[in-house]
Image (cartoon, rainbow, N blue to C red):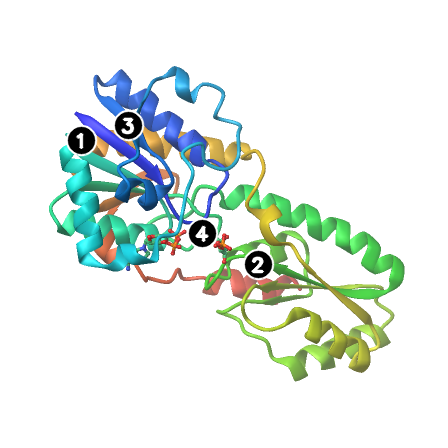
């Protein structure tokens, strides 16, 4: 077979490990593997190149994506998807592996519905893909955030401050939730557990009166202005407050071992699912076992996090 692979959406640490596994296992099974530059952008512009085993040498530990990535809003339009379909066919490609998040999966599903064989691999720091317990990149980003929280706590307690840390995740609270648990945050504010400002200020005032020396609040991005909240906390709670927006450092860096293993397993497994003729599916991991799920069933499906929010209440 001629198998093509692309990375799409936000880059995530471990994407290279997944590409490496696709290439190595693909060649091992007797196939030809082609990389597509810059996600759906390169697919539309017909930018393909053949990948050898040597091309992916040394990539296991490198963050980002060696293939490049992009966001291509017009890929939602059927005539644009048809251009991609034609390019794949004209190149003699039999199957496409898409490494990305929920949005990239919609593109993969569109190509499947046009009749092209596609398999998805979940690559995003957000962990917002329903068909898998963990996405590639999540653990590395989590590690970066927890390291930042530990450092911010040092300075917060020295100055008796309340530190607000804004993390990525878009509409998913997983990075904030997991990092908040790991970092012992007093408050975790996510789309699933939104801000109750009056309650927050009341509790902070109580903590300040009890003599606590710091407070940590972890917030998922895009909900409200964290700097405005810090100013209000400073005026009303007794703690002075500062907000830190972690930004793109969360997406970079060498993947942690958990992401290298996950990406390697998923990459090799995706090739096997391609060989079995599966299409319109994505690979995932559930209870440490590799699985596949239909893309049509997992897109737009939120993950159930009641147990973890309950844990936060129990151990705060
Ligand atoms: P992620 O894959 O990390 O969720 P995005 O949501 O930005 O990232 O999606 C990546 C790309 O996937 C988009 O820029 C677009 O090219 C493609 N895409 C997103 N939504 C759709 C859709 N509804 N139909 C087709 N392609 C889509
Ligand atoms: O999907 C990954 C992600 O890092 C989100 O957490 C964030 O909202 C978004 O990408 C940022 O995207 P961009 O790189 O386009 O600014």
Whichever of labels 4 and 1 marks the residue nearer the N terminus, that label is 1
Does 283 sit left or right of 110 as displayed? right
Q: Which residue is mark 3?
A: 34
Q: Which residue is mark 2?
A: 176
Foreground tag (4 vs 1): 1
Whichever of labels 1 and 3 marks the residue nearer the N terminus, that label is 3
Foreground tag (3 vs 4): 3
Gap in angstroms between the C-alphas marked 1 and 2: 43 Å
* Closer-to-camera residue (222/269): 222
Gap in angstroms between the C-alphas marked 3 and 2: 36 Å
Q: Residue at x 36, y 48 (%)?
A: 132
Q: Which residue is mark 4?
A: 127
Foreground tag (3 vs 2): 3
Residue 74 in the image: x percent, y percent?
30, 57
Q: SS at mark 4?
A: loop
Q: SS at mark 2?
A: helix
Whichever of labels 1 and 2 marks the residue nearer the N terminus, that label is 1
Q: SS at mark 1?
A: loop
Quick one: label 4, few (<14), some, or many (20+) residues within 10 Å? many
Q: Residue furthest left?
A: 115
Which disc number belongs to residue 91?
1
Gap in angstroms between the C-alphas marked 1 and 3: 10 Å
Q: Is residue 294 visible?
A: no
Whichever of labels 3 and 2 marks the residue nearer the N terminus, that label is 3
Q: Residue 316 appears in which quarter of the rendering? A: bottom right
């Amino acid at each position: 077979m001629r198998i093509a692979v692309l990375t799409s959406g936000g880059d995530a640490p471990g994407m290279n490990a997944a590409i490496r596994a696709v290439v190595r296992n693909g060649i091992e099974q007797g196939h030809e593997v082609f990389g597509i530059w810059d996600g759906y952008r390169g697919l539309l512009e017909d930018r393909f190149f053949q990948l050898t085993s040597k091309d992916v040498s040394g990539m296991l530990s490198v963050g980002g994506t060696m293939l490049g990535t992009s966001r291509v809003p017009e890929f939602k339009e059927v005539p644009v998807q048809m251009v991609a379909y034609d390019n794949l066919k004209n190149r003699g490609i039999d199957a496409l592996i898409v490494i990305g998040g929920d949005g990239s999966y919609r593109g993969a599903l569109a190509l499947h519905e046009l009749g092209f064989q596609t398999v998805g691999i979940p690559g995003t720091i957000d962990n917002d893909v329903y068909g898998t317990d963990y996405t590639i990149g999540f653990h590395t980003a989590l590690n970066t955030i927890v390291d930042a929280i530990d450092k911010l706590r040092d300075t917060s307690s020295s100055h008796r401050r309340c530190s607000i840390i804004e993390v990525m995740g878009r509409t998913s609270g997983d990075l904030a939730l997991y990092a908040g648990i790991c970092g012992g945050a007093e408050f975790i504010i996510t789309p699933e557990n939104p801000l109750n400002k009056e309650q927050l200020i009341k509790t902070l005032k109580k903590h300040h009166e009890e003599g606590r020396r710091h407070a940590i609040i972890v917030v998922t991005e895009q909900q409200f202005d964290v700097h405005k909240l810090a100013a209000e906390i400073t005026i009303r709670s007794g703690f002075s407050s500062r907000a830190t927006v972690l930004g793109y450092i969360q997406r970079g860096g060498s993947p942690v071992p958990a992401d290298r293993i996950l990406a390697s397993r998923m990459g090799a497994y995706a090739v096997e699912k391609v060989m079995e003729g599966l299409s319109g599916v994505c690979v995932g991991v559930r209870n440490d076992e590799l699985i596949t799920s239909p893309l049509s069933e997992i897109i737009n499906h939120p993950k159930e996090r009641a147990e973890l929010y309950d844990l936060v209440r129990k151990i705060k």
